[in-house]
Image: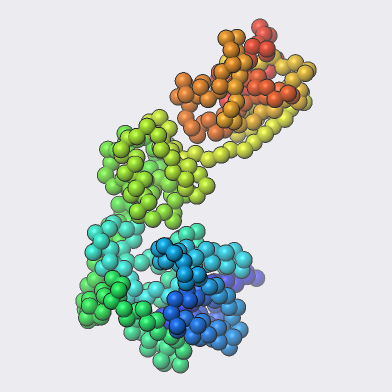
Amino acid sequence: MLLMKKYCVAVSGGCDSMTLLDKCVQSHLNVIVAHVNYQKRESAKRDEEIVRKYCEIHSIPFFVRYCDPHHKGNFQGYARKFRYDFFRELCQQENCESVLVAHQQDDLLETYLMQCQRKSIPLVYGLAKSVKHHGVQIERPILDMTKEECYQYCFDHDIPFGEDESNFSNDYLRNRLRREVVDTWDAVKRQEVLEEIERKNLARQKHKEEIAQFVKNYEDLPLEEFKKMEDHEEILRAFLNQQGIGFSLSERRIRLMCETILKDVSAYRFEIDGKTLMKSYDVLQIVEDVDYCYQFDTIEEFDCEYFKIRKTGRSVEAVTLFASDFPNTIRPYQKNDAIQLRFGKKKINRFFIDRKISHKARKCYPIVVNSVGNVILVPEIGCDVEHYTDKPNCFVLK
């Protein structure tokens, strides 16, 4: 028998999230509840108790985390990261499939109007039913319900909820759009705007597929090709996403990265999800650290992802190994590696620069080191002066 999927429901205590939670309970879903108390208003404790009591009545695991209300700087940004870190940790801890959030149709319409006002070209117009955000899979099950329908659901089913006073403030653009625009629409106007959003999203999807097809051709993105294209920000995001990173990057950061890339400066690097996007000669590359280490007590044929050992090969792959060299080691290039040649010692990084070896290739480039730690062979460059003979007994192929 398959185990029932478990979901984490984000519940603030407002009518939307209480509607979502009760619908989950009525559908017999296996859920836990995550509540974030921002401690910024007097009614915050009331809302926490509403959610806590509902969970106690229905035997639902309840988890709460408290923000620092005195955080200095951008509180909205801090709070966003705080709650998504909480959701991610909770999903991992409790083995949850995804986080269910209570965005409803009014939220979708307000978001769309904000996008139009800002003249932004988002990944999705309005709100997506399912999206990965800050490393968390987010689902929006009640996106087809209106705010009014959420209120009515709570009244009809006697579900307690709290009102957030900040929703009535004119300090926020979303609130003004809600009261001055969305609340004035009748059902016909709502449907017209919803259909407009759907048309735009279909067009966006087609455009995204064309861009995805373009970046699919490249493991490394040629800079000249990138510059010729339109929609640099979308191409860059698609390139990053194709390689499994950058899904949570903000539009602003993507835009700033593109501005730097298009300036054609000599060097730049951006740290993204544990990897590095950087310029490597005439391409954009995703570079990551590579860690391997193979030790050998004898000469033997060997194959791995990064190199091969053979008994024959080219002179630039050849080395003569002596008994004193064992055990020898083959590992990736390290920053200060150097090799002793007839005309003196030379840093291997200098060879890489002279031969325009990409930064990605440098990270996994195999280096042969003898028992006392001396670099004795760099495949395709050659061996050191002490290990050069007319009859080499080992070849390391990159």
> Is 4 placed left or right of 44 in the picture?
right
Please report the residue visible at 35 percent of the width from the left and 53 percent of the height from the top: 252
Way the structure is coloured:
rainbow
* Up-down relation of residue 272 to residue 122 (above or below): above
* Up-down relation of residue 174 to residue 369 (above or below): below
> Is 75 placed left or right of 85 in the picture?
left
* Up-down relation of residue 114 to residue 295 (above or below): below
| Location of the C terminus (image quadrant) | top right
Identify which residue, 205 or 150, lies in the foreground: 150
* Up-down relation of residue 252 to residue 83 (above or below): above
Q: What is the x, y in percent for residue 380?
A: 55, 19
Q: How many marks?
A: 0
Residue 22 showing in the rendered view: no
Q: What is the x, y in percent for residue 301?
A: 70, 24
Please report the residue visible at 42 percent of the width from the left and 88 percent of the height from the top: 154
Residue 2 placement: quadrant: bottom right
Q: What is the x, y in percent for residue 203?
A: 27, 57
| Location of the N terminus (image quadrant) | bottom right
Please report the residue visible at 24 percent of the width from the left and 71 percent of the height from the top: 193
Residue with the most extreme top position: 390
Residue 369 placement: quadrant: top right
Identify which residue, 311 or 183, lies in the foreground: 183
Please report the residue visible at 38 percent of the width from the left and 65 percent of the height from the top: 128
Identify which residue, 65 or 279, lies in the foreground: 65
Residue 68 showing in the rendered view: yes
